[in-house]
Image (tube, rainbow, N blue to C red):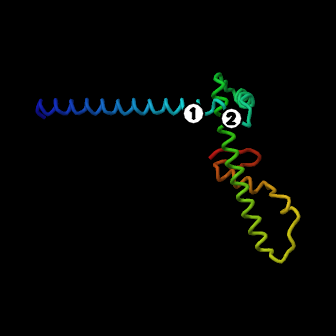
Amino acid sequence: FSPAAVLKRERESEREVVLLSNAMAEQAERWIQDAKDVTAAIQDYNPAIPAELVEYYAKKQGLSIEDPQVAKLIAISTEAFLSGVLGDAVELTRKLQTSTAAARKDAPENESHKKGLTLHMDVLAKALADSGVNKVGSMYKLS
């Protein structure tokens, strides 16, 4: 290699480092702005799960949450997760109810169908499994 070629390659490497550094700085700025946006969005929202409950279970697992916004964000995330699982369970229950009713066209309509949907453990287990939570004995694990 000639000294000129080595010098040229070093300059190209320096430019690549600067470009990468600038890209990382821009990504960090976007991440900080996203965090600020989330913080502002949750400011006035009161989740169904109290932050104190999150703090209690976190402490029970040996985790200390010092920032109340962190507990509130976990509570909101948990609420969104539960809402999604229950929505999936309702959809599965409706599909099962519809397919069962179609299979028994001649049978009189069951009184429980008039009252609404009933959530059964097998349907809930399927909805949880679809969300990444699998039942193992009496314990649940994330997959």
- Percent coordinates x, y for residue 33 in the rendering: 49, 31
Q: Amino acid at mark 1?
A: Val
The N terminus, quarter of image: top left
| Horizontal arrangement in the rendering, residue 128 relative to residue 14 (left or right) | right
- Give the alpha-carbon distance from disc 1 to disc 2, as whole Å: 14 Å
Q: Secondary structure at mark 1?
A: helix
Q: Amino acid at mark 2?
A: Ala
Q: Which of 140 and 33 lies nearest the eye of the viewer?
A: 33
Residue 111: give its label: none
Residue labelled with disc 1: 38
Say which quarter of the image contains residue 106. bottom right
- Percent coordinates x, y for residue 59 in the rendering: 71, 26
Other-residue count near label 1 (Cα within 10 Å), few / some / many at <14 / 14–19 / ≥20: few
Q: Secondary structure at mark 2?
A: helix
Residue at x 75%, y 59% (from the top left corner)? 93
Residue 75: give its label: 2
Question: Closer to the observer: label 1 or label 2?
Answer: 1
Residue at x 63%, y 29% (from the top left corner)? 43
- Percent coordinates x, y for residue 72 in the rendering: 67, 31
Q: Are marks 1 and 2 in contact (CB under 8 Å)?
A: no
| Horizontal arrangement in the rendering, residue 108 relative to residue 29 (left or right) | right
Q: Is residue 3 above or below residue 101?
A: above
Residue at x 70%, y 52% (from the top left corner)? 87
Q: Is residue 122 above or below residue 101?
A: above
Q: Which of 22 and 45 lies nearest the eye of the viewer?
A: 45
Q: Residue furthest front?
A: 44
Q: Is residue 57 above or below residue 81?
A: above
Say which quarter of the image contains residue 71. top right
